[in-house]
Image: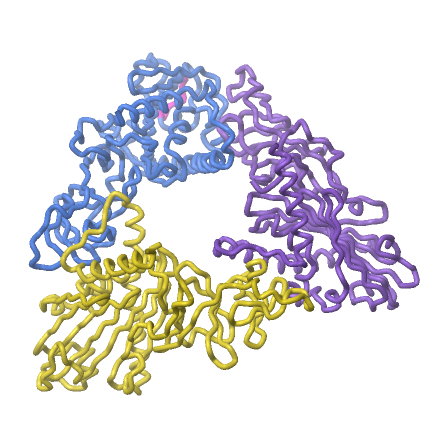
Chain colours: A yellow, B purple, C blue
Amino acid sequence: MTFIRNRWYVAGWDGEVGNKPISRKICGEPIVMYRKLDGSVVAMRDACPHRLLPLSMGIREGDNIRCKYHGMLIGPDGTPEEMPLVNERVNKKVCTPSYAVAEKYRYVWVWIGDQTKADEGKIPDFWPCDKENWVFDGGYMRVECDYRLFIDNLMDLTHETYVHAGSIGQKELMESPLETSVDGDKVTLSRWMPNISPPPFWRDALQQDVPVDRWQICEFIEPCSVNIDVGVSPVSEGDTLDSHDSGVRGFVIDSMTPETENTTHYFWGMARNFRIDDQGLTERIRAGQDNIFHEDIEVLEGQQKSIADNPDMTLRVLSIDSGGAHARRIITRLMEAENG
Amino acid sequence: MTFIRNRWYVAGWDGEVGNKPISRKICGEPIVMYRKLDGSVVAMRDACPHRLLPLSMGIREGDNIRCKYHGMLIGPDGTPEEMPLVNERVNKKVCTPSYAVAEKYRYVWVWIGDQTKADEGKIPDFWPCDKENWVFDGGYMRVECDYRLFIDNLMDLTHETYVHAGSIGQKELMESPLETSVDGDKVTLSRWMPNISPPPFWRDALQQDVPVDRWQICEFIEPCSVNIDVGVSPVSEGDTLDSHDSGVRGFVIDSMTPETENTTHYFWGMARNFRIDDQGLTERIRAGQDNIFHEDIEVLEGQQKSIADNPDMTLRVLSIDSGGAHARRIITRLMEAENG
Amino acid sequence: MTFIRNRWYVAGWDGEVGNKPISRKICGEPIVMYRKLDGSVVAMRDACPHRLLPLSMGIREGDNIRCKYHGMLIGPDGTPEEMPLVNERVNKKVCTPSYAVAEKYRYVWVWIGDQTKADEGKIPDFWPCDKENWVFDGGYMRVECDYRLFIDNLMDLTHETYVHAGSIGQKELMESPLETSVDGDKVTLSRWMPNISPPPFWRDALQQDVPVDRWQICEFIEPCSVNIDVGVSPVSEGDTLDSHDSGVRGFVIDSMTPETENTTHYFWGMARNFRIDDQGLTERIRAGQDNIFHEDIEVLEGQQKSIADNPDMTLRVLSIDSGGAHARRIITRLMEAENG
């Protein structure tokens, strides 16, 4: 096992889950999700408790789902409402596991592991995703790599220069020092670039061409998210690394939900506090992120294959990898704590 | 191992096996079959005893087959007639396993397991397939599931309502009680529907629109067949469940030969005693069955994948599954007896 | 393990390796190869020593290669020239394995195993490939079989009759006796056909239609090559099996480098001493060999699958297989010696 189980995991975008059942494997468990008539989301094991046919092949009836094989009618809690024979006594013990679900920050979250421990208060804090005067949008990709390789990738911005040479990589980013700090189960990487000329994207966002202070702050949030605070403010605003909410600001929001030990659901997006009603800008940002993340995926899938092909070699940890290394140590410690 | 070995298995339709060798894996063993000049069928392991090239890649010579690699000429009994070097002494010990073959009921049957025990008397009784004034035809499909899931499917007619909602499923079928009986190694499921209005297929077959008695009798015949006696007779004929040979009658004939532990050769067809010279009707029945069985295959392959994906869940046996459960117990008992 | 490790293996044709990195797995090890500015070839493990991304995805800089992920610059010896952070101290211990390389006989050879034992003197003797007044050309195919099945194939010319029935197979070849001899780690199979009429290919090569002596001499050269001396000379020249360098002569040059235990890189060609400046003839020979070797591959891949499908059967050794059997014994003995 390479993941912590008793956690909320992003299982889908709010727009992905509707009346029609969809199936997605989370932490190795096949899960079917759909919305009830009241709009709330149901998640249960994607297998009829009778003969294990995927419930996602079934037929929706009210808030229930009827198995396509023998017609057992399964309620949103995973227990039968009707048995295959119409007048047979309903046996609630013949049931499929169900999962606690929450909707927050435009995501559908599913609690894997011990359901008695599900508590919405434990959903990670993605505050820019639902703060007033901010807007949040993004996309989804399935990636053939261990989710921890993806965390390594996002907790290190050095790779931008080479992986994204044709898009966002630029030499300037290499010239300011990075600081790493660990606080409990959080890891933070920060870079403060005072009094520089803003690059085109940010000048356009700021709608001024003045000297700016620029920041990049990556935060690993267990079990599998990395959110990156990015932006610029005019030098005249007097912002600092610790206090920087003038100018224009965005958060790159990344959640790498394990599908299996070697495959990952990647949910990505950007929350921003500038030109929030400009839907065209929202779409251009999403298209730009989609391009960039495909560059990461090419590298991550190549790396995953190479690890399997070179069993005599090991991943080395250099100074630039300290963010990812701290994140992996936290994951390992939390997994060990969970397994007693 | 999930199958009984010392048994006759359907290996092909009579029309599938001709002069040209065909290869089919039965109970995990690759078998090449072809017809000799006298029309009889040869079955042997599909591997040259010399360097194991599939004999099905070879060249037919008279009743023999010459290996495409070094030209060893193999006779119908699996022993060499000529060695690779023309004048080399023929060594009959360098041979490939051969299989007892029988042709009966339009099927080519192959005896797997201990060849000294092959006895044509042990071929299951599919009497409607060669009875006078009956006609029999059908088709073949390869299915990615354990053959026992297919037996479960056919020993339970409840699934028709949901799996075949668009074709043969109808509510009426759910209203009459089913009876299950076990007699030695046979399992029988019967349903008698007295004095009902015939559905379109049967009214058309009967060529009268009168009240009928209708029956469905499923019989599991080890190791892997399920034949279903179906039909209607006018109420005035006075038929009963035990004696019902008036009116129009058909048998759905199903053999699920294991290819491997997780894949199945499905040979299906219908024998009938009405309008037996109507070749157009024969073709329409075959096309109809082909449609319906594709609906089953979608379910069976989904179920097989789901069983692998949900290792913590088990198949539950409800009352409707008693036919299949009995059949599985018989298979297990016969396998254990075989293995001593 | 099914191969000897401390050996030179053909890893590519001279024309295949250029400025752009190419990746090829040899004896299970992924290797990246490219040419330096001076034209010499570099071979190292195709994995960055930092995070294992294939170096073949990287960017060439001078004689070095820069990893596409974090930009570590790796020199031709597998050690870093620059770390990912520009001013970080270079740690030469963070390195990837490199391989001794030689170029000889138009091939790029790579030494697998203990690099301290690499010695160009140990490259097998393919003298016709670089002898004055000879010309050598050929091609490459990847084959899904154990390389030893391919050695069996080439150390037995009986198969020509059946596998190559449509191309080079002919009955005449079966009529002269074969002689097998073993001398240390070499195995030789010879066939001398005195005073026969030359077949079309050789009559065309000889540019005379006179009675000829014809020869075929297969030599297994460990670890994985089989070179075949073929040709004809006019009877009047008085050649013998031991001394035959009149008339026209060619060598079929075959190296079967293991990619993995079940897949093989097949490098094949022909060296000849007649009409050596006729480039059209060179191309026709290459096209002819390409056709013929595809016939072998069909058989070899069928054989490999059949071996897996028939675990209860074993490869039999008949008299025609003695060449391959001797070669396999030599390989086994050398592997055992290597493993102590």
Q: Classify B104 as above or below B253.
A: above
Q: Nearer the viewer, residue A90 or C159?
A: A90
Q: Is residue B16 visible?
A: no
Q: Classify C38 as above or below C88.
A: above
Q: Is residue A39 left or right of residue A190?
A: right
Q: Position of residue B335 (x, y in %)?
A: 62, 38
Number of disc labels: 0
Q: Classify B80 as above or below C286.
A: above
Residue visible at 48% across and 53% down?
Answer: B311
Residue visible at 20% across and 78% down?
Answer: A201
Q: Nearer the viewer, residue B226 or C139?
A: B226
Q: Classify A174 as above or below C12.
A: below
Q: Is residue B281 left or right of residue B20?
A: right
Which span of residues is magenta-colored? Answer: C206-211
Q: Quadrant of residue B199?
A: bottom right
Q: Is residue A44 left or right of residue A8?
A: right
Q: Nearer the viewer, residue B313 or B79?
A: B313
Q: Is residue A30 visible?
A: yes
Which image quadrant: the N terminus of chain C?
top left
Q: Nearer the viewer, residue B286 or A323?
A: A323
Q: Position of residue C84 (x, y in %)?
A: 14, 57
Q: Quadrant of residue B211?
A: bottom right
Is residue A141 on the magenta stretch? no
Q: Position of residue A222 (x, y in %)?
A: 28, 66
Q: Quadrant of residue C185?
A: top left
Is residue C208 on the magenta stretch? yes
The chief SS type of the magenta part is loop
Residue visible at 78% across and 56% down?
Answer: B230
